[in-house]
Image (cartoon, rainbow, N blue to C red):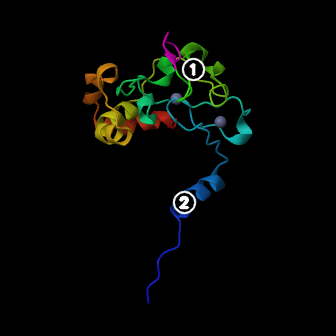
Amino acid sequence: MKEVSSLSLDKMKEFRMKPDRILIDQLCKCCWVTCPFCAAVCTNTLEDHSPDDHNVPFHRPSGINGWHKRNTVELSVDFCTTDVASDGRFYPHHDSEEVIPYKQYRTAGPGYADWRITADTSQLKYWTWFVCRFQKQLEDHYKLKFEGSGEIPSQWKTHSKEAAIKSLDEMFGL
Ligand SMILES: [Zn+2]
Ligand SMILES: [Zn+2]
């Protein structure tokens, strides 16, 4: 006897999400809010901070989250921490022409206003290695390219996997 599965895709996704999610929820009261630029997860705990002050010690190149130069296929290799110190601007909403200077990103509305992104030039090696290692997967996923303004710096390609993993120690404060 055979039976067709009646599980919806959504339901299956829910199951897939659950085990790890439950575990982590039990182990820590993590915040889970993601950076609007690079999607790094806020590392504060819920008890730890006010809801309008999310932050994370290390951001990532925003192309990992699909940010790209408008009307081009050029993915961004810029870290948000660099962007917020720059004179560049961004479109906070996909379907709007509204432009916000990066230096005033907190005025871009919900999702931006409640993040504290400290301007600096840090580039965690893990993420530069990650972009090189998964360049093709990211490009295929977003149907965009790391080219032009989003060309991967050649220096990033010199980082070994070991150095990348070692840099995670720094991220976790070990
Ligand atoms: Zn970020
Ligand atoms: Zn938070």
- Label 1 with label 2: CB-CB less than 8 Å: no
Q: Distance between the residues labelled 1 and 2?
A: 37 Å
* Residue 89 magenta: yes
Which quadrant of the figure has residue 115? Answer: top right
The magenta segment is 84-90
Which quadrant of the figure has residue 123? Answer: top left
Amino acid under label 1?
Thr
Q: Can residue 169 be seen from the camera position used here?
A: yes
| Residue bearing mark 2 | 10
Q: Is mark 2 on a helix, strand or loop?
A: helix
Which quadrant of the figure has residue 43? Answer: top right
Measuring from the top left, give residue 89's x and y in whole percent: 51, 15
Measuring from the top left, give residue 6's x and y in whole percent: 53, 73
Tag of residue 81: none
Q: Left of 45 or right of it: where is 83?
A: left
Amino acid under label 2?
Asp
| Residue bearing mark 1 | 118
Give the quadrant of ligand 2: top right
* Classed neighbour count for the residue bearing mark 1: other residues with Cα under 10 Å, few (<14), some (14–19), many (≥20): some
User: Looking at the image, which residue is at 40% across and 25% down?
Assistant: 76
Q: Earlier in the sequence, mark 1 or mark 2?
A: 2
* Residue 99 magenta: no
Q: Left of 105 or right of it: where is 172?
A: left
User: Looking at the image, which residue is at 71% across and 41% down?
Assistant: 46
User: Looking at the image, which residue is at 46% across and 18% down?
Assistant: 121
Measuring from the top left, give residue 163's x and y in whole percent: 33, 34
Q: What element carries label 1?
A: loop
Q: Which secondary structure class fits the magenta region best?
A: loop
Tag in front: 1 or 2:
2
Q: Left of 83 or right of it: where is 118?
A: right
User: Looking at the image, which residue is at 30% across and 23% down?
Assistant: 151
